[in-house]
Image: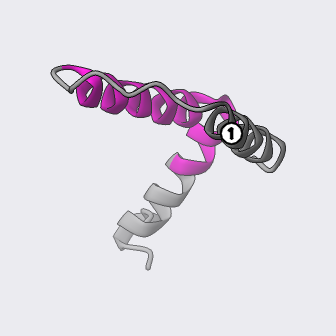
Amino acid sequence: WIGAGGQKGPKQVKHVLREALEASGVLDKARAQLRAEVFRCLEQGSAPRPQLSNENMLINELIRDYLEYNH
């Protein structure tokens, strides 16, 4: 949808802004910062975590490697 005077509609503006922010890396940085803050907030005031078994640590590392490889 293009308005009077050749102006772009809200969807086109959103699309252009998203592409620009992704291309500059700003969007990825903002997502990472938001995730870090969410985890920080969740960790504050939480009960101490139980000790992980060796099997669970190995599984966690495998999942992390998989996610890094497929990102």
Q: Residue furthest bottom?
A: 1
Is residue 44 among the parts visible in the rendering? Answer: yes
Determine if the magenta segment contains residue 29.
yes
Depth check, front residue: 35 or 42: 42
**Residue 67 location, x and y as percent?**
72, 46
Q: Residue at (79%, 47%) from the top-left corner?
A: 66
In the image, residue 33 sits, relative to residue 35, either above or below, namely above
Q: Considering depth in this image, is 39 or 11 the residue closer to the camera?
A: 39
Residue at 20 percent across and 26 percent down: it is: 46
> Foreground residue, 62 or 33?
62
- What's the amino acid at mark 1? Glu
Residue most extreme to the left: 45
Q: Quadrant of residue 53?
A: top right
Q: Tell me: 47 left or right of 3.
A: left
- Residue 14: x and y in percent read 44, 57
Q: Is residue 63 left or right of residue 16?
A: right
Instruction: Work out which residue is located at the far right of the displayed protein and give it.
Output: 69
Q: Is residue 9 visible?
A: no
Examine the image and state in which quarter residue 44 appears: top left
Give the magenta-colored segment's residue range: 18-44
Q: Residue tagged by mark 1? A: 55
Q: Quadrant of the N terminus?
A: bottom left
User: Would you say residue 43 sits in the magenta stretch?
Assistant: yes
